[in-house]
Amino acid sequence: MATSATNLRTASLKHNLSSLSSTNKHSAFSLTLRQPRRKPRFIVLSASLGGKPTVLVAEKLGEAGLSLLKEFANVDCSYNLSPEELCTKISLCDALIVRSGTKVNRDVFESSGGRLKVVGRAGVGIDNVDLAAATEHGCLVVNAPTANTVAAAEHGIALLAAMARNVAQADASVKAGKWQRNKYVGVSLVGKTLAVMGFGKVGSEVARRAKGLGMHVIAHDPYAPADRARAIGVDLVSFDEAIATADFISLHMPLTPATSKILNDETFAKMKKGVRIVNVARGGVIDEEALVRALDAGIVAQAALDVFTEEPPSQDSKLVQHERVTVTPHLGASTVEAQEGVAIEIAEAVVGALKGELAATAVNAPMVPAEVLSELKPFVVLAEKLGRLAVQLVTGGSGVKTVKVTYGSARAPDDLDTRLLRAMITKGLIEPISSVFVNLVNADFSAKQRGLKIAEERVTLDGSPESPLNFIQVQIANVESRFASAISDTGDITVEGRVKDGIPHLTKVGSFEVDVSLEGSIILCRQVDQPGMIGRVGSILGEENVNVSFMSVGRIAPRKQAVMAIGVDDQPKKETLKKIGDIPAIEEFVFLKL
Ligand SMILES: NC(=O)c1ccc[n+]([C@@H]2O[C@H](COP(=O)([O-])OP(=O)(O)OC[C@H]3O[C@@H](n4cnc5c(N)ncnc54)[C@H](O)[C@@H]3O)[C@@H](O)[C@H]2O)c1
Ligand SMILES: O=C(O)[C@H](O)COP(=O)(O)O
């Protein structure tokens, strides 16, 4: 077997391993442990002793939700509070409910003096809530992820049609006393190709509706199951094919490091001249300055935008003022029906959390006693990072649907509870590709919702059962990889890791053994093994001031193919990665964020 023949040599260039904590924005919440045979509970209100808890509703909430809240709590509806006013009020509140317009930052949690126990986000995105601060202050955050899906999809379709027929521009013109019938000739939707970018809850509803309008719908979503797309007559295609063939592009992916400014000068240049763009996802997925350039160059004929990098955008924004751009003030979720639904969903979640019940829409997780965490903590970090790595290696195929996790342990099967580890692998697999937040409470629910099946297998090893685990292996079946060497003999994307001296390490990629600590980010290169490779890559990174934390090379045999794993503290620039790719002996490489 390739692995047993692998000759592992590790060039440890620099050890900067002081912190075990993961650097991604959600990981601070991932350390929720299930205590065996005990039902986990969220924090229970202490401030409500002897009376009803107080819920501050800081943005308008549907009546049905308010009624539910009032049955259980004193409800203070105070809208348009300044940051200072919010901080003053919060010390008297046990829960806070907001939409996207209120910044719930660290100051809010600090000002609460420990009384604030639950923040409810009446909607999907929680970009406006400081999750790290919430968890540090023992405050649970819950959201309402499903009730506004249809509203967002309908708004996408409304913008699509309004844009194609110049509705907003023509309306303004008539109101200004003009009658410009020739100026506002539109384009038809029927028979045109719509590319839905992000085929999740909202994207698939948009696709369904666009089919009804007679459009030819394609979709790009590397993680969506092909059968779900097929079921509504949509072809899943690559990113390049989607943007190059579309007459209309509608964006429905979450804002993640991978999707940030995914529409930029380079990608606009690949689009059909005269393409029309709709964005009801998040402003940050478009490079807004590049969009203005593409509009002025005639590449993009029109755009219709509900969301902006900064909200509200500045009044003199060239994009907002552009005559071929239609804008709305983040109205995707704003229908009477959606807001009633969201209000009920969030009120139930907040009341449940105040009672100490588990919430399926919990975004973070409760703090747990340190002694419970201590044994599994490094494996929890390892599990999440392996999930993150594995999903970032996927490029296509039938979607991420089947994941096999193998735990190698010397402990008896009932002496190792893997639910936390499975939850963290699920978190790692789902979060980089969606707007869903996963923790121990909602992991299985989130996986099921996405049609993701996680099969677990235990391999009982000889040796001392002192450590709970020897290794964790994560395999994704029926997918293609953007790093072909990550596919092992079984045909699956395979990554394996171990904990060494308390630090999680990546120890196997595909059939290649490597050894790199799972911190910062990782570059994987497949190369023809030869002298000087570590030095060449190391000096390119050094010249660009990218700090290398670890480097190792796993090879099948001397001078044959090898995989080099390089841990880096900083994100290399595109040009730096290109220089590495340009080294003749390097056959493929990939940059992965942990
Ligand atoms: N304008 C509004 O008021 C409004 C309302 C609701 C949702 N939203 C936004 O719409 C977006 C979608 O929400 P949702 O509820 O459908 O989320 P979702 O998680 O159900 O769907 C997101 C989809 O994007 C896919 N995806 C991830 N990375 C991708 C990539 N690089 N390329 C292509 N696809 C990728 C995921 O696989 C997933 O299927 C989110 O950004 C959400 O915040 C906006
Ligand atoms: O994230 C969401 O749910 C949407 O963007 C809607 O945000 P809103 O509740 O502020 O309208």
Image (cartoon, grey):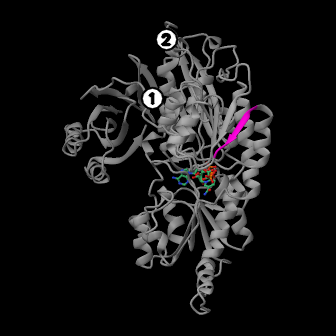
Asked whether the viewer can see residue 207, the reply is no
Q: Nearer the viewer, residue 267 or 532?
A: 267
The residue under label 1 is 1
Tell me: is circle 1 under 8 Å from ligand 1.
no
Q: Using the image, determine if residue 200 lies above or below residue 166.
A: above
Residue 7 is left or right of residue 469, and the answer is left
- Disc sitting over residue 467 in the figure: 2
Residue 513 image offset from top left, x and y in percent: 39, 29
**Residue 17 falls within the magenta-colored stretch:** no
Residue 405 image offset from top left, x and y in percent: 58, 29
* Span colored in magenta: 73-78
Which kind of residue does numbered mark 1 sit on?
Answer: Met
* Dominant SS type (magenta): strand
Q: Quadrant of residue 351?
A: top right
Q: Nearer the viewer, residue 127 or 202?
A: 127
Where the C terminus falls, by quadrant? top left
Q: Name the residue: 30% across, 50% down.
A: 573
Tell me: is circle 2 under 8 Å from ligand 1.
no
Q: Nearer the viewer, residue 584 or 294?
A: 294
Q: Residues within 10 Å of mark 1 (few under 14, many from 20)?
A: few
